[in-house]
Image: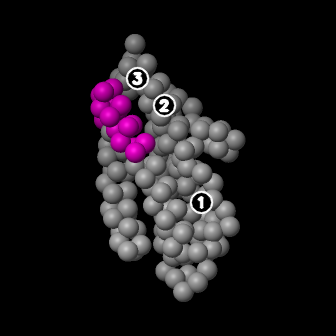
Amino acid sequence: MKNLIGIDKEKAGILINQLNHLLADYQLFYQNLRGLHWNIKGKEFFELHLKFEELYDDAVIKIDEVAERILTLEGEPLHTFSDYIGISEIQAEKGITNGKIGVEIVVKNFAVLILKEREILALAGDADDEGTMSLMSDYITETEKTLWMLNSYLR
């Protein structure tokens, strides 16, 4: 049995579940970035304040895209913080004011996201779901470059 866009419903259900996990991870990542943006202090304030804002602006776009992909697959995106906290692999961070620690947290969070995106990419390939594959492929490409840059910053 296939859904409206021609994806096997059982495989779409698996993708919806994994995309909801990714959605939860992105929501926690977004909140972590907002906290870092607001609370960072020190000599690198201006540079990191802007970088964290750039990253959370990008994350909020991805949150919407993932939720819309879930809807396209005929699923329901999670939308409560209790749901997100219950399944996210990314931990909520608070009280971080040190720039280096903040960047290390962002790198750690991106590592969770890219692993999840690779898993979803493989599942989408198995389901012949080009839309989800394209989305994950784009995210992976962006994340790889961002991780390279953040790791260069930390050295």
Give the residue pinned by disc 1. 32
**Quadrant (top left, top right, bottom left, bottom right) of the C terminus:** bottom left
Is disc 2 placed on a helix, strand or loop?
Answer: helix
Residue ID at (33%, 26%): 127
Disc marking residue 58: none
Quick one: 7 or 93, which is closer to the camera? Answer: 93
Quick one: 146 or 105, which is closer to the camera? Answer: 105
Q: Nearer the viewer, mark 2 or mark 1?
A: 1
Residue 146 location in percent, x, y? 37, 63
Q: Residue furthest bottom?
A: 43
Q: Quadrant of residue 107?
A: bottom left
Q: Residue furthest top?
A: 1
How many tags in the picture? 3
Q: Give the mark nearest the N terminus, 2 or 1.
A: 2
Amino acid type, callout 1: Asn
| Residue 128 in sight | yes
Q: Are marks 2 and 1 in contact (CB under 8 Å)?
A: no
Q: Residue furthest front?
A: 155
How would you classify the magenta stretch by its main secondary structure?
A: helix
